[in-house]
Image (tube, rainbow, N blue to C red):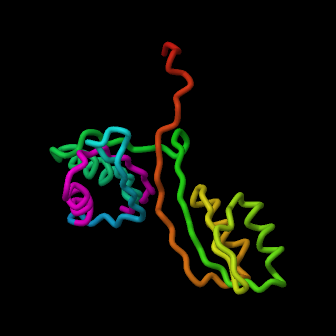
Amino acid sequence: MYKPLREEIVSVLVLNQANVLTRVVSMFGRRGFNIDSLTVSPTADPSLSRITIVFSATEQSMQQIITQTEKLEVVKEVVVLSRENSIYRELVLMRIECGLDKLTTLKAIVETFRGKIVDLSRDGIVVELTGTPHKINGFLDAISEYSITHMTRTGITAIEGINDDKGEQE
């Protein structure tokens, strides 16, 4: 029987030590999971780092990998982030070929998507854009007539949103 895959965003709080990222990521690889996006950085506490992993899994296999990740001694917390109650963003930098004749139109598209032009030359521009992957993909569609010569995306980073009903009783 076919079991549908869901894309999941998991936030893993880990000790900020050498080889921690390798240990967490290799567990996913050994169990056959393909990581679609991975970001990692220290937290406000310099002894801890947060790894944000985006991957696709069935409900059952997702629970298994989360349970196995939680068992690693370097892992302090694993949270599956819901798209409805979390804030997630991605950064993209891209170099776009553009002559002076099309620069005004391209600038207008960048402004519409609230991007920034961070470098400009006679032959093109470098754009910085932050947002959801949906927003970034929309921008890429909007500039499809232009030639992107270089592009790099950071991958998703995410955080749980603020729960407004913490003070309410159930």
The picture places residue 136, in percent across and down from the top left corner, at 62, 64
Q: Residue at x 61, y 78 (%)?
A: 95
The picture places residue 126, in percent across and down from the top left corner, at 63, 74
Give the mark count: 0
Q: Residue at x 47, y 43 (%)?
A: 159
Question: Quick check: is 117 in the magenta stretch?
Answer: no
**Vertical placement of residue 166 versus 128, above or below:** above
Foreground residue, 101 or 76?
101
Q: Residue at x 69, y 81 (%)?
A: 121
Q: Is residue 83 left or right of residue 126?
A: left
In this picture, which residue range is highlighted in magenta? 1-29
Foreground residue, 158 or 15?
15
Q: Residue at x 41, y 57 (%)?
A: 54
The picture places residue 138, in percent across and down from the top left corner, at 67, 65
Q: Is residue 147 left or right of residue 8?
A: right
Q: Is residue 28 left or right of residue 8?
A: left
**Vertical placement of residue 78 versus 96, above or below:** above
**Vertical placement of residue 74 versus 169, above or below:** below
